[in-house]
Amino acid sequence: MSDLKNKILSMVREDLTEIEHALKQNLNPYLDLISDVASHILFSGGKRLRPLLMILSARICGYKGDMDKTYSTSTIFEYLHAATLLHDDLVDGATLRRGQPVAHSIWGNSITVLTGDFLLARSLSISVKTGLIKVIQIMTKITEDMSQGEIHQLTRMGNLDLTEDEYIEIIRRKTAVLMQGACWTGALIADASEKEEKALAEYGVNLGIAFQMADDLLDYTSDTSILGKEVGADLKEGKLTLPVIYSFKKADSEDRIIMEKIITDKIFSFNDFELLIELLKKYGGLEYTKRLALKHVEKAKNFILFFEPSATKELLLNIADYALVREA
C-alpha cells in the first residue's frame, strides 16, 4: 500500500504544489477570520484528490491550455468539499477531523456555518470564470445532490431497516457526485469528445462509491491515530453503513438482538464495539463491503481503458486501486 501511495505522490508532486498555491491564492484578500476557519479545514492534511482528479482528467484528454487557470479552477472541488465537511461535522456533532479538533469547537457554530457557506459560494464563483455553462450546471447539481444525500441520511439515522440500495444512493450523492463532477469538468475544460466525457464521469462516480465504501470499512478496521477521527463515530452518530447493513440482515435472531442493542446505544463501550466487529466478521459484512468496493474500482478502471497509454492513464488506474487499500 505504501509503495502505491509513494508512487502516486511522486508522479503528482508538482500538481499538488500548484493546487496548494491556488487554494491559498483564491482565499485572499478576504476577512482574516474566514481565512483562519477555512484554512483550519483546508490545510489540515487533505489529500487534494478532487482537484487532482480534475487536472488529470483534463490531461488525459490532451489539454494543453493555461495550467495556472486550470489549477485555479480545480480549487472549486476542494472548496466545496471543505464546505461540506464544516457543515457535516457540526450536524454530526463530531469532535475530530483529520486528527484535529473540529472547527465549530474552536470558532462556534455560527462562524463555522457561515464559513462553509462562503466556501460554497467561492466554488461557484470560480466555476463561473470557466465560461462553461455545463461546468456551472454540474456544480449546482453536485450541491443539490450532496444536500439531499445528507438529508436522506439524517432522516434514516439509526433505522435498522435501511437497505443496501438506500445506502448506495446516499453515498453516491454525498461522496461520489463530487468526484464525478471533478473528472467530468476536467474533460469539459479539455474540450473532450462525448465518449471521453462520459467515460471520465463514470470513472469518477465509481471511484467515489468505492472510496466511500473503503472509508466506511475504516471505521471498523482502523484506529483513531490513523483515521483522524474517533473510531466508531459513524455508529455513534446513528449512521448505518454497508458492513452493518449486510451483517444485520444475515445475522440469526440471537445475534441480531445483540447487534441491535449495540447499534441503538450511542454510548456503547469499547468491549461492545469489539463484539460488534466480531459479528461483522462472522456474518461477512466487512468482506462483502470489500468485494463490492473492488467491483466499483474495476468498473472505474474499465471505463478509461480505451484511452491511449500514458503516465496520466497509469495514474488514474493507480488512484482507483489506492482507493481500496488506503489506511485513512
Image (spheres, rainbow, N blue to C red):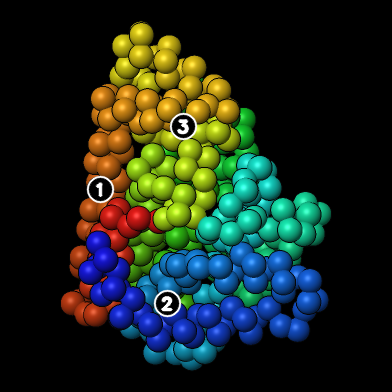
Residue 201 seen in the figure: yes
Where is the C terminus found, in terms of image quarters?
bottom left
Q: Earlier in the sequence, mark 1 or mark 3?
A: 3
Say what amino acid the circle numbered 2 marks: Ile
2 vs 1, front mark: 1
Residue picked out by circle 2? 55
Mark 3 residue crowding within 10 angstroms, few (<14) / some (14–19) / many (20+):
few
Residue carrying label 3:
270
* Disc 1 target residue: 294
SS category of the residue bearing label 1: helix
Q: Which sits earlier in the primary sequence, circle 2 or circle 1? A: 2
Query: What is the x, y in percent for residue 179?
Result: 45, 60
Q: Which mark is residue 70?
A: none
Amino acid found under the numbered disc labelled 1: Leu
Q: Earlier in the sequence, mark 2 or mark 3?
A: 2
In this view, which residue lies farthest toward the left? 309
Where's residue 101, x and y in %? 63, 56
Horizontal arrangement in the rendering, residue 308 relative to residue 90 (left or right): left
**CA distance separating discs 2 and 3:** 43 Å
Please tell me how crowded label 2 is: few (under 14), some (14-19), or many (20+) other residues with Cα within 10 Å: many
Say if residue 134 shows up in the picture: no
Binning the other alpha carbons within 10 Å of mark 1 as few (below 14), some (14 to 19) or many (20 upward) gives many
Question: Residue 187 at x, y = what percent?
Answer: 41, 72
**Residue at the image position 63 percent from the left and 38 percent from the top:** 151
Give the residue type that dot 3 points to.
Answer: Phe
